[in-house]
Image (tube, rainbow, N blue to C red):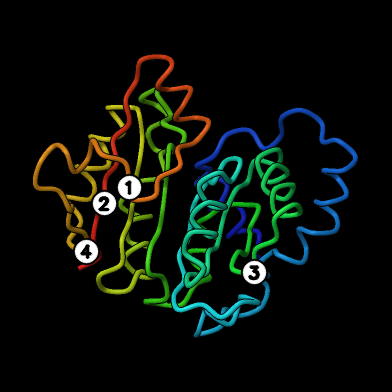
């Protein structure tokens, strides 16, 4: 990646800190041993058929951006083995938790990336994904930081390019301002249509939804989740 591209990426920093507590020896071992086996290599051209990225035969490919500790990604990959999943998480400790779970329960339909999701999106071929999930992303509460929210015109353009017609962009958050922000941005984008006919559609969690640790914390603090689904026209 050129210096100019790296500088451009730096201005698009949609995530916060990269490190939490120091990794334990076993976590370091998995990061050094297991992660390279699962990591997507963006230094080579993406295959036109993304299904070839996976050890298991899959029918379609989906992407989860910012999977945290991997609770939903592991659950969904196990529940729908016919789908391949690209999981992106730049937070080192979240990735370590995911690797620990995969070490105990290996799945052949998951590939990982440990940096900026926009790098993967720009690497992917056109019309190559059946779905993109963005659950409980950093809301960047302060107005001066709103430009760092992942949902933006530029990223929706990225989504529109890589999603197949009929593909789904799913967004969940407990922050009302970010929910409204996402609705406004998607409504203004010609490629997306919100799938909701009543409040039950966005108040009801997705089919098979296992919940996440962050969501549980939000519920304990009195906040409720909103579950939005947008279809790629």
Q: Residue at horizontal 46%, vertical 34%?
A: 138
Q: CA distance from mark 4 to mark 3?
A: 32 Å
The residue carrying mark 4 is 191
Q: Is residue 233 left or right of residue 125?
A: left
Residue 128 placement (x, y as % from top left): 42, 76
Residue hosting label 1: 206
Q: How much space separates mark 4 and mark 1, taking CA atoms?
A: 22 Å
The residue at the far left in this view is 197
Task: Name the mark on residue 108.
Answer: 3
Residue contact at pointers 1 and 2, CB within 8 angstroms: yes
Pick the front one: 4 or 29: 29
- Distance in Å between CA atoms under marks 1 and 2: 9 Å
Question: What's the CA distance linking mark 3 and mark 2?
Answer: 27 Å
Q: Residue drawn 20% across and 56% down?
A: 189
Earlier sequence position, callout 3 versus callout 2: 3
Look at discs 2 and 4 and give the one toward the viewer: 2
- Residue 76: horizontal and vertical position, in percent? 48, 55
Q: Is residue 190 left or right of residue 131?
A: left
**Which is closer to the viewer, label 3 or label 2?**
3
Figure quadrant of the C terminus:
bottom left
- Mark closer to the chain start, 4 or 1: 4
Mark 3, secondary structure of its residue = loop
Label 2 secondary element: strand
Label 1's element?
loop
Instruction: Judge whether 12 appears above or below 168 on screen.
Output: above
N-term mark: 1 or 3 = 3
Q: Are marks 4 and 1 in contact (CB under 8 Å)?
A: no
Element on which disc 4 rests: loop
Q: What residue sits right under mark 2 in the picture?
A: 229
Give the mark toward the camera: 4 or 1.
1
User: Disc 1 vs disc 2: which is toward the camera?
Assistant: 1
Q: Give me the residue at 26% from left, 37% from top.
A: 181
């Amino acid at each position: 990646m050129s210096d100019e591209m790296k500088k451009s990426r730096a201005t698009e920093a949609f995530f916060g800190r990269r490190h939490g507590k120091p990794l334990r020896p076993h976590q370091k071992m998995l990061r050094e041993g297991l992660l390279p086996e699962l990591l997507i290599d963006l230094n080579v051209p993406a295959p036109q058929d993304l299904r070839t990225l996976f050890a298991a035969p899959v029918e379609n490919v989906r992407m989860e951006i910012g999977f945290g500790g991997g609770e939903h990604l592991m659950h969904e990959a196990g529940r729908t083995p016919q789908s391949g999943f690209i999981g992106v998480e730049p937070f080192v400790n979240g990735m370590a938790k995911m690797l620990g779970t995969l070490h105990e329960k290996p799945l052949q339909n998951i590939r990982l990336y440990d940096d900026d999701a926009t790098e993967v999106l720009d690497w992917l071929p056109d019309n190559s994904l059946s779905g993109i999930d963005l659950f409980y992303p950093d809301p960047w509460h302060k107005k001066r930081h709103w430009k760092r929210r992942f949902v933006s015109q530029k990223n929706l353009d990225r989504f529109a390019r890589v999603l197949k017609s009929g593909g789904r962009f799913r967004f969940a958050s407990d922050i009302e301002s970010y929910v409204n922000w996402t609705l406004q941005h998607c409504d203004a984008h010609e490629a997306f249509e919100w799938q909701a006919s009543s409040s039950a559609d966005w108040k009801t969690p997705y089919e098979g939804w296992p919940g996440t640790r962050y969501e549980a914390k939000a519920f304990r603090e009195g906040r409720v989740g909103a579950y939005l689904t947008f279809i790629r026209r």
